[in-house]
Amino acid sequence: GQRVLIVGGVAGGMSAATRARRLAEDAEIVVFERGPHVSFANCGLPYFLGGEIADRNKLLVQTPERLKAVFNLDIRTHAEVVSIDPEHKEITVRDRTSNRVSTERYDALILSTGAAPVVPRVPGADRPGHFALRTLEDMDAIDGWIKERGATNGVVVGGGFIGLEVAEQLHRRGLRISVIERNPQVLKPFDPEMAAHLHIELRKHGVGLYLNNGLSRFDSPTAGERAGASVVVLANGTRLPADVVILGLGVRPEAKLARDAGLVIGPTGGVKVDAHLRTSAPDVYAVGDAIEVTHGVTGRPALIPLGGPANRQGRTAADNIFGVPSAYPGTLGTAIVRVFDRTAAVTGANEAQLKDAGMAFEAVHLHPNAHAGYYPGAAPLALKVLFDPVTGRLLGAQAVGADGIDKRIDVLATALRAGMTVDDVADLELCYAPPFGAAKDPVNLAGMAAQNVRAGLVHPIRWDEIASLDRTLALILDFRDRAEREAGAIPGSVHIPLGELRARLDELPRDAEIIAHCASGQRSYNACRILMQNGFRCRNLVGSFKTWKAAV
Ligand code: FAD
């Protein structure tokens, strides 16, 4: 049989190894992992820190013994692969316990070396009490430090997925938490008005959120300042004393091994692979966080370090080695995160990525209930769908809410992968009973709203166009009820409850454009239909007051 060597024994590497075994009982499969553990649940690490996962052993999904017994895998831990010789099809391995170096021959090699946390190059970065979270050892170190020091406050540097998960979990553990972020918003894959819902949620739970304000340096506490491990100094000079600092600045592909071996590295810094996950060297494959993928919507090279893609790529690489034709279709970036009582999920491209790629797009925003409004516990969600205005093809979707977020984004991710248009989405037949959804599911509604835009039945205006409107040429009309209006309104807007519109049409100017809004956009869409059929020029504020309020 073939001799298959795998570098990296976690998500992508172990998927490749077990798939390889299922395809080839006679293959020799050796997995080299430089750390002490293989197949551990890196995605679960934050939840141990917060105590939601109480049993550390649950994070060790597999042991080398079990992998040997069930899959006949030769697992070498503490084994660091230090070089690859693609010409002679050999790798060099250093045993980290004995320092012994050996060479190993391969017929096929799979690199699943993952990614390394970005370390900030600022003064004081090496002070004790600063941690990234990538491995079980990192998790143990954070846990130990918090216990030992009796840490009561922490600063998370960077508002990405892992940063927010750790912030939530350390807050759950009783720490006072601040999150600092260089960009004006957390979670870059989301558009700003969607991320804004999470800003509200973080602040509601007492998390100190410092946006537009990156890390400048770390100081030691000065006299009169709270004693702690470090003082996190922000770009604007704000000083945040911290007992523990979590670095959530994102990751870079672990591509050094590949680069040193002369393998082609893509413009993003990830190992370049083809659709079969082959690198530029014969019989060398690469998968997971280490590789550059093709974005499934924009077609551009991208780094999308996620567990799902890594696992599927591992399987694909093994398939290709053992003659099962298999191509990786690109990555959509489908991802989800819980932040306290809100869940946020995303798939496909966001506005920034579409603009970068020069792709035309249109957006709809909806705030429907997650299930029928008359059934107890109905809570609205914010759903945004991006689509091609010409072809109607779906380009991306984002949702934030209390529940039902995962299924909406998973349905839309499936639709996206299938190349569906907004017409297809409007017609999806989804399950419905009052506790679960609505006869027109939010996903259907998004498709229908997009159809209306494409058909010219309504003309959209975005929340970020409101501030710069020339108010001598445009009149903002609020179609909500009186009680809603009293709780807050767009400055300078005029109030006409929807039920009064037909009777009050002659109050409205015919020379100005009317910008219609309500709370979610549904009543103002009805208003726009009345206005347009009476000869008025009208645009509907996308996402209406809820989106505008969250974003502004
Ligand atoms: P990894 O799983 O990181 O495995 C790479 C392994 O290679 C490492 O164990 C490393 O020690 C080893 N290695 C590297 N170089 C060498 C070498 N030269 N020799 C030997 N061994 C080497 N993704 C999601 O989709 N959802 C989530 O909720 C989620 N949560 C996460 C939470 C945390 C805290 C972290 C850290 C990640 C999370 N991810 C999540 C991301 C997901 O874990 C990764 O995308 C996935 O593990 C990548 O798989 P991989 O095989 O490429 O790399």
Image (tube, grey):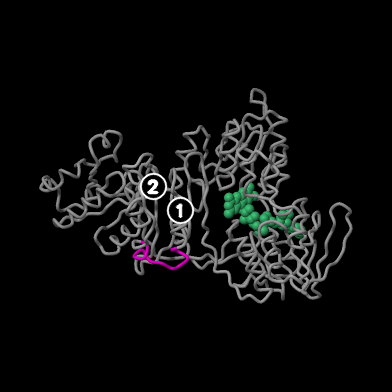
* Residue 463 x %, y %: 35, 49
Amino acid found under the numbered disc labelled 1: Lys
Q: Check disc 1: other Cα within 10 Å, few if <14, some if 14-19, many if 20+.
A: few
Amino acid found under the numbered disc labelled 2: Ala
| Image mark count | 2
* Residue 119 x %, y %: 67, 48
Give the SS element for disc 1.
helix
| Image quarter of the C terminus | top left
Give the SS element for disc 2.
loop
- Tell me which segment is drawn in magenta: 415-425
Write down the residue under mark 2: 370
Q: Is residue 546 left or right of residue 286?
A: left
Seen from the viewer's position, the closer of residues 46 and 66 is 66
Give the CA separation, mark 2 to mark 1. 10 Å
| Image quarter of the N terminus | bottom right
Write down the residue under mark 1: 407
Q: Check disc 2: other Cα within 10 Å, few if <14, some if 14-19, many if 20+.
A: many
